[in-house]
Amino acid sequence: MSEIIPAVLAKTPRAFEEALIQIPPELPLIHIDVLEHDVWVEPKRAFEAHLMVKNPEEVMPLWIERGAKRIIAHQISENILHWRGKVEVGLGVEMQVPLQEIFDNIPYVDFVHLMSIDRIGEQGYPFDERIFDRIKSVKEKFPKTIISIDGGVGVENFQRLIDLGVERLVVGHNFKDVWSQMNKSKS
């Protein structure tokens, strides 16, 4: 079964708190987008940290100490992989990165986090349908690899992503609509 993970991208502690209030407790995990500045506020719930920073190795231990269950980094190194077992480690892949460049790293991570928008670091960018072929390519070569999709996920595309085998859907501001629609389709 696929899981919906609400994304929180906040530029101030107050915005972070306001975003957390909107997320129902039935959704057990949140996705925190970590930019170069830190607006940390204790979420008091399980979370994954998406490290969209220049040096993820430097901030990764801090986010693990804060309680992250999963860490997503856009570059993989021995220092990052050292934390596998303590947390799930995911490889973030931007849309413009050719998949062939990441295939050698997939066996060393717990999941692949494919971006489905052209720009990262902000919410509201349109979903890029090229992601469907990228999902198929990863699933063909690595059928047991967990895939997480992030960016532009909505009611109009979530079912197709699930049908392609995507296990995790990171959803921004419209997560309630996707969650509601997903629950309706289960009934």
Image (cartoon, rainbow, N blue to C red):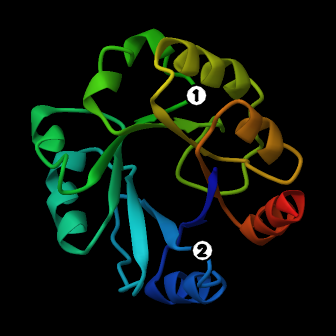
SS at mark 1? loop
SS at mark 2? loop
Q: In the rendered image, which residue does mark 1 sit on?
A: 95
In percent of the image, x 47 and y 81: which residue is there?
A: 12
Q: Which mark is residue 27?
A: 2
Q: Nearer the viewer, residue 49 or 159?
A: 159
In percent of the image, x 66 and y 38: which residue is there?
A: 117
Mark 2 Cα-neighbour bin, 10 Å: few <14, some 14–19, many ≥20 = some
Say if 88 sits above or below 133 in the image. below
**Amino acid type of the residue that numbered disc 1 sits on in the rendered structure:** Met
Q: Quadrant of residue 128?
A: top right
**Amino acid type of the residue that numbered disc 2 sits on in the rendered structure:** Leu
In percent of the image, x 71 and y 30: which residue is there?
A: 164
Where is residue 26 drawn, in percent x and y? 62, 80
From the viewer's perspective, is the residue at label 2 or at label 1 nearer? 2
Say which quadrant the C terminus sits in.
bottom right
Mark 1 Cα-neighbour bin, 10 Å: few <14, some 14–19, many ≥20 = some
Q: Quadrant of residue 22?
A: bottom right
Where is residue 7 drawn, in percent x and y? 57, 64
Left or right for 142, reference 73 = right
